[in-house]
Structures are given as C-alpha cells and as structure tokens.
Image (tube, rainbow, N blue to C red):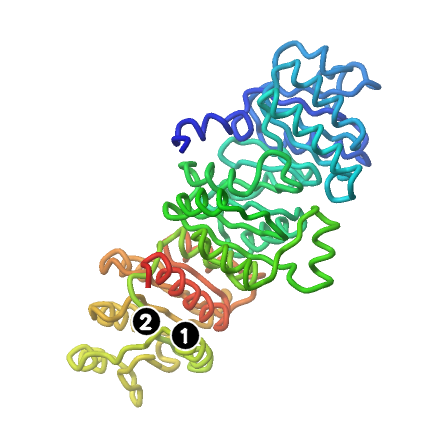
Amino acid sequence: MTNEDEILEIYRPLFYPKTVAVVGASDNPFKLGYHALAAVISSGFGGAIYPVNPRISGEIQGIKSYRSIAELPEEVELFIYAVPDHQVLPSLKESARKKARAGVIFAGGFREVGQEGMMLQEKIIRVANAAGIKLIGPNCIGFFNTHGPINATFASPLSMMGKGGVSVVSQSGGMGTEILSQLQDELVGVSKFISIGNRANVDFVDMIEYLSSDPHTKVICLFLEGLDMGRDFLLRTKARSERKPVLLCSFGYTEKSSSLALSHTGSMASSEMIYKGAIAQAGIFQVKDSARMVRLAKALEMYGPLQGTGIFIETHTAGPVIAITDICERGGLSLPDLDDEIAREIQTFLPPHAVAANPLDMFAQAWTDTSLYIKAADLALRQDNITCAVAVFATGMGAGPLFPVKEFADLSRKHGKPVFICLIAPYLFPEEARSAQENGVVAVNSAERMGHLLVDLANFSKKIAGD
C-alpha cells in the first residue's frame, strides 16, 4: 500500500498548489469563469494566479491575463476549467504540456449523458493519466481547502467557511452544498470539501485514503448517489476507516431516485440491502440523513467515540427530557440509577419536591441558579456506568441567565467523559451555542436532535469497538 507521505504528495498539487490557472476566466459576472476566478481570489490563495481567455487581453479582475495556456510564463500545478465540455479535452492537452499536476472540470456532458459523453470522458482520463494529472469532476462544483487556503469552486462565499477538522466528499454538488450549510448551522469548521462529480480518475476511495492521511482532517463525511464497489474499494476503504471516522449519507434506492442518479452523475446504487452490506464491510458508518451525519461528525471531532452507553440527563424543564429519554432507550442507551450515596448528596441541594434521580428534574430553580447543573453533573459523572452527561436548558435568548458552559466543559476534562447541552433555542440565536462549543461542549438545539445524536454516537462507538 502507498504510504502516507506518498499519498499526501500525490494530492499536494491539488489541495496545496503553488500556482493556479483559471481557463475561461472572465470579467462578466454572468459567466462561470468570472465566479471561478473570484472564488480563487476570495480564498486568499498565496501563489500565482493566471486567468486564461483567448478573447481578452490585459487584465481580468485586476490580474494579468493570458490568451492561451501556452503563453503562461511558468509551469502551473492546478488548472480550473471553466469552459464548455467540448473545450475541456484540448485545454487539458495544453495543460499537460505546461506540466499540470491537477485539474477541476466543472462542465457536464460526459459520462452522465450516455455513450458519446462516456467516450469523451474516457479520452480525458487517458490524457490525464498519461500526464499524471489528478482530476476532480467532470460535472462538479470543484473543491476547497480552508487550510491551503484555496477555493477551486465557482462559489466565492464558500471561502468564508470556518476552518476545522471535518472534511466532506460529495458526489452531488447540491447535496454537498446542503451539508456545508448544515455544518455552518451547527457551527462546525471544515477542513476540505470535494464535489467529486463523475469521478474521472479521483474516486471516493482515493479521497478516503488521502483524507485519512491528512493531518487537518479528523472526520470524513461522504454523500453517495451510487458507487462501483469492487473488492479493491472494500479493502482499501476498510484499511483507512479504521484510522478515522468515515460517515456516509446515501440515497437513490427507489426506482425514480435511482434513475435520476444515473442521469445526474452516471451512477446507480445497487439494491439497498447489498449496498448497505458492502458499506458496512468497508468500515463506513451509514447515517440516516445528512443533518444527523453533520451532528455526529461534530461530536466525533470534539470528543471521539463514547466509552459506554450510560447517560445522565439533567434539566429544569421535563418535556424535552421525555423525548430524549424515549429516543435513547429505544436506541439501546441506558439511564443508570444514581448510586445511593450520590443520590443523597444531590438531594441536599435540590429545591423542594425535586427527587435525586436519572433523569434529574430540578424545576425552575435550576434555570435561575444554574450552579445546580454543575453540582449534580459533577457527582453523577463519578459513576463508572455513566458515560456522559446531558444538560437540557431552555435558553433565555439574552433575556435570562446563561448556562455555565465553561464550568460544564471543565467537568468533562475533570472526569474524562463528554458532556452535551441541549439548548432549546432557534438557529437564529446561535451565540450561546457558539460559546458552548468554543469551550468544548457539544451543543444541539432540540430534544429530538439530541436524542438521535446520542443514539448515532453510541452505535458508531459500538461499531468501532466490534460489538
């Protein structure tokens, strides 16, 4: 197997290029080439940028432009092709003569449109392979790397994504964008995003191998529409998924969705049972939907797997806890009874009529005196059969007390166990959630989401433990 240094070097010109050329660059905001060049500029890329357009002399977007690839003053590592499908092949051949090492092809009209498109894609692959060029696409929105930095898409706002440790590989550009939006909603930073499209000569398993070696990636998220999964894929993915979490969201099993996937990226999922079995063999953890995948990635990036299935839940409002408890117990988690001694200690500071139990309802007094949360969790986390603590708190959205997230995070470090907070609040009011996660507490804003996150995290943890 190729070692880590070799893998990182193979894809270094793609994710960390020294020079970039945008073929088809434009000053016209109604042209794809305008947005492709703007994306590179907006990323803060530190190397040389070369706009190429045969119809423009002088400058494009304030940068000296060139009328052909042949005129470029030096060899260029990464080429971004913002040109129609029929111009890709000749542009790629010219790029090869400029010692290109990587490329991004936005255009459709290849494998996904039938035999003629398939033949054109195969010609592109032959040229790229002969020249040692790694291609993202065709039929994709490109990629970005927050640690480069480089934005090789046609969406400059993606340059504003926060830097983090979650990487996303998506067959669909649209679903990839949705996953990125959900990561932003959950206040999760991104390492790399790859819209892989038709997978000319860079496939999912190649990206899994690369990202599992990438020091800036902690969790890998995949969105698949269909995949040719041979023995090579299973073995290579299995070897890499044992090193870092690889999560998957996949659709396209019904008759209509499957046919749409075929016309979209030229891929079709096999039967759902066979497909899921193969994914499991590859060591990939499949999540029911993209939002749950994002929240699980957040928890894994921050805490890693759970070391057991016992949870302690505390609150000042019982309704959401009923929902979390129901979901967790149905999902195989437990809420262990408090040990007698711990229960007695908790009882000493509870308000009248509250009972020391798990779940623990401390009534409205805990909303105004939030120290009760810290005292109770500190005691409960002493129990060996309690794996994590969950605080449920209806935020005052600036009009009431704030939850003591720093003190709650300190408990996690003190006991070596993860803590979570279910902040009942809209996404439009993220300040408290941001404060929680900056301090090291996983924050979720609804009871149902919290319950499903705990179940998914426990199931992932069981999988890697071989249970």
Q: Position of residue 318 (x, y in %)?
A: 42, 82
Dot 1 falls on a residue whose secondary structure is helix
Residue in the image at 64% along x and 30% along y: 40
Q: Residues within 10 Å of mark 2 (few under 14, many from 20)?
A: many
Instruction: Give the quadrant of residue 62.
Output: top right
Image-based side of 334 in relation to 425, left or right: left
Image-based side of 402 in relation to 150, left or right: left
Image-based side of 44 in relation to 37, left or right: left
Residue in the image at 51% along x and 38% along y: 206
Q: Nearer the viewer, residue 455 or 363?
A: 455
Q: Quadrant of the N terminus?
A: top left
Residue 352 vertical placement versus 367 (above, below): below
Residue 311's tag is 2
Q: Are marks 2 and 1 in contact (CB under 8 Å)?
A: yes
Q: CA distance from mark 2 to mark 1?
A: 9 Å
* Count of marks, rendered view: 2
Amino acid bearing label 2 = Ile
Residue 9 vertical placement versus 441 (above, below): above
Q: Nearer the viewer, residue 106 or 178?
A: 106
Dot 2 falls on a residue whose secondary structure is strand
Residue in the image at 54% along x and 50% along y: 222
Q: Residues within 10 Å of mark 1 (few under 14, many from 20)?
A: many
Amino acid bearing label 1 = Cys
Q: Position of residue 355 (x, y in %)?
A: 28, 86
**Which residue bears the numbered disc 1?**
328
Q: Nearer the viewer, residue 166 or 382?
A: 166
